[in-house]
Image: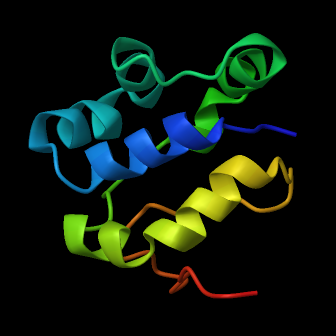
Amino acid sequence: MIKFDPASARKLISTLSSDDLFREQFTVDPIGALEQAGLMPSGKDGEAIRANSSCLMVTQLASKADIRMAAQEIDRMLTSGSSQTVPALDAGLARGLHLRAA
């Protein structure tokens, strides 16, 4: 189970919904972007993210407006520690995945 602390989750969501340079870096190197911004979880959560870095690959990040609109749901996913709930931050997936209330 990977879990972000609430303050880091909110900062990540805020940064992804507002900072173009961070968004660009996150798309190219998500782990590097998290580390540089001081948002990489510590301990086992950080290790799990690094070990499963392929799960963080982003082809096209959702728009800043879409991330802002889904901020509460993304926050819940990032802080719940559920290994089965992963926020899809990719935009335009062929499968049509959407963030939605459970």
Query: What residue do we see at 44% from left, 75% from top?
Result: 70
Q: Is residue 4 above or below residue 33?
A: below
93 vs 42, left or right, is: left
Query: Can residue 53 be seen in the rendering of this structure?
Result: yes
Q: Is residue 36 above or below residue 75?
A: above
Front-most of 66 and 88? 66
Q: How is the image coloured?
A: rainbow
Query: What residue do we see at 65% from left, 35% from top?
Result: 5
Image quadrant occupied by the C terminus: bottom right
13 vs 97, left or right, is: left
Q: Is residue 55 above or below residue 64?
A: above
Q: Is residue 79 above or below residue 87?
A: above
| Horizontal and vertical percent position of residue 100 | 60, 86
Label count reads: 0
Residue most toward the front?
A: 7
| Horizontal and vertical percent position of residue 6 | 61, 43
Front-most of 16 and 30? 16
| Horizontal and vertical percent position of residue 60 | 31, 58
Front-most of 58 and 80? 80
Image quadrant occupied by the N terminus: top right
Query: What residue do we see at 66% from left, 37% from top?
Result: 4
Name which quarter of the figure residue 85 lies in. bottom right
Query: Can residue 58 be seen in the rendering of this structure?
Result: no
Residue most toward the left?
A: 20
Query: What residue do we see at 33% from left, 35% from top?
Result: 26
| Horizontal and vertical percent position of residue 33 | 35, 24
